[in-house]
Amino acid sequence: MRKHFLFCGPSGSGKTSIVHYLLSQFSFMRFSVSATTRPKRHNEEDGKDYYFLSVEEFKKKIEEDAFIEWEQVYEGRYYGTLRSEIKRIEDINCSVVFDVDVEGGMNIKKCFGDNLLSVFIRPPSVEDLRLRLIARSTETPESLQKRLEKSVFELGYEKNFDNVIINSDLEESCKKAKMLVETFLRKA
Ligand code: 5GP
């Protein structure tokens, strides 16, 4: 069975930057493009960062059993991993890289077992997370508050992951993530 990779951590922890770095380093990796009902950010592309769906479209896909996992990550904001996405990547003999919330991550772990490397990306502190989210300018004061509340909950999941990277320096964290991938690939 192919090996796959899971990266979780609170919003603003830097996990997406680490995932993008790994994708630039390993040509056999492909990003699992999730479906979401949250609005598209100015720097995002439909079909590349996410498949942006209406709530109705998302619910129809739930009924069709199109998701391997899905969560209402924030109130009214659905996110899910499409089965078709995994098939698309496995069909070209590549490994899937998942960037999902911790609960979705736990479900993905159940699906792939030992063939999945799971890494939790932790910010040095919640205050640090707050500053990063403010600097990113993607949130309203309300959504920022929701993300911070959720992050405290997510930090409690750290122990369920194979590895933890404390992301105080992005360059260092990218190097660590690369080493973890290489070590995992060497394992039988
Ligand atoms: P953002 O809105 O910042 O892109 O993502 C918010 C959270 O949703 C992040 O923790 C992200 O990893 C998570 N997420 C993205 N895609 C999925 C998915 O397919 N399933 C689940 N459960 N969470 C997802």
Image: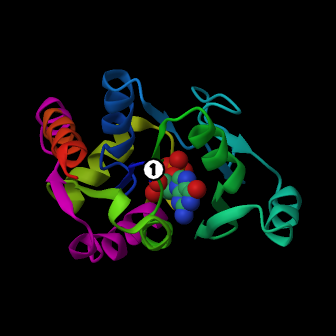
Query: x, y (%) of residue 56?
Result: 88, 61
User: What residue is shown with label 1?
Assistant: 99
In the image, residue 47 sits, relative to residue 90, either above or below, namely above
Query: x, y (%) of residue 89?
Result: 58, 39
Q: Main secondary structure of the magenta part?
A: helix
Within 8 Å: ligand 1 and the Cβ of disc 1?
yes
- The amino acid beneath tag 1 is Asp
Segment colored magenta: 145-174
In the image, residue 174 sits, relative to residue 103, either above or below, namely above
In the image, residue 35 sits, relative to residue 154, either above or below, namely above
The front one of 56 and 24 is 24
Whether residue 9 can be seen here: no
x 68%, y 54%: residue: 82
Residue 64 in magenta stretch: no
Residue 170 in magenta stretch: yes
Query: x, y (%) of residue 77?
Result: 66, 62
The front one of 138 and 9 is 9
Residue 11 is left or right of residue 186, and the answer is right
Residue 59 is left or right of residue 176, and the answer is right
Residue 1 is left or right of residue 82, and the answer is left
